């Protein structure tokens, strides 16, 4: 039985392989890996009450099998906060067992708890497996994402 819960300080050893897997999926591994300082700072933010960044983990039989990182922010088109589901990852051996859906549903519940009426995220158009789930639990609005690193 998979349980979703807030990340705890004692989860670091189980969370790190999931975080590394997520980053590798998006091409951040080896020479292109995130700097250790970024991972350490993210970890610290989870436990800083002044930060709007939150982490959830999915646990099955005492082992972490998934993660979700999300944050709340203001919007120019809404009064209430919105929730950005920034990172979602399920271990390869746990895929297809409802772990991703459980994490998303928990983020939805936490968003409702703070009055946020919208949760959104982005993924690569090539993430066919993820999009099969996303099409069941959310609506694709057709936006194309641009970014620029200053």
Image: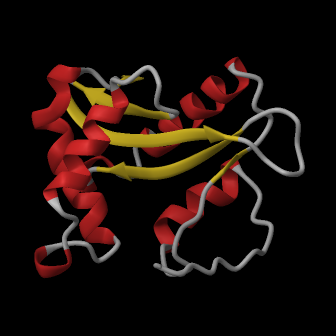
The residue positioned 68% from the left and 60% from the top of the image is 135
Q: Quadrant of the N terminus?
A: top left
Image quadrant where residue 6 sits: top left
Q: Picture coordinates of residue 72 (x, y %)?
A: 62, 37
Q: Is residue 102 left or right of residue 122?
A: left
What residue is shown at x 51% (from left), y 75% (from top)? 124
Tell me if I can see residue 135 in this picture.
Answer: yes
Q: Is residue 124 left or right of residue 80?
A: left
Q: Is residue 86 above or below residue 80?
A: below
Q: Nearer the viewer, residue 74 or 140?
A: 74
- Residue 47, how many percent across, how many down? 33, 24
**Given the current orientation, which residue lies at the most extreme front position?**
150
Q: Is residue 50 above or below residue 76?
A: above
* Residue 30 vertical placement versus 38 (above, below): below
| Drawn side of residue 7 relative to residue 149, left or right | left
What x and y, as percent, mark residue 73? 66, 41
In the rendered view, would you say 35 is above or below 78? Answer: below
In which quadrant of the rendered view does residue 13 lie? Answer: top left
In this rendering, does residue 62 appear at all? no
Relative to residue 92, is residue 2 drawn left or right?
A: right
Please tell me in which quadrant of the rendered image residue 23 appears. bottom left
147 or 24, nearer to the observer: 147
Please state the horizontal and vertical placement of residue 107, each as a whole percent of the image.
57, 33
Q: Residue at x 89, y 50 (%)?
A: 77
> Which residue lies at the image location 35% right of the left edge and 30% below the top edge?
46
The foreground one among 117 and 71 is 71
């Amino acid at each position: 039985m998979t349980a979703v819960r807030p990340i705890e300080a004692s989860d670091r050893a189980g969370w790190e392989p999931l975080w590394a897997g997520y980053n590798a999926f998006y091409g951040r591994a080896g020479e292109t890996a995130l700097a250790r300082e970024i991972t350490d700072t993210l970890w610290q933010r989870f436990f800083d009450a002044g930060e709007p960044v939150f982490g959830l983990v999915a646990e099955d039989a005492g082992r972490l099998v998934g993660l979700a990182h999300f944050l709340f922010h203001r919007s120019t088109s809404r009064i209430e906060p919105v929730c950005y589901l920034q990172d979602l990852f399920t271990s390869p051996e746990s895929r297809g067992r409802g772990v991703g859906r459980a994490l998303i549903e928990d983020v939805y519940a936490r968003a409702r708890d703070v009055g946020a009426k919208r949760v959104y995220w982005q993924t690569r158009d090539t993430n066919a497996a993820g999009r099969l789930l996303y099409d069941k639990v959310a609506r694709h609005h057709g936006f194309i994402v641009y970014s620029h690193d200053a």
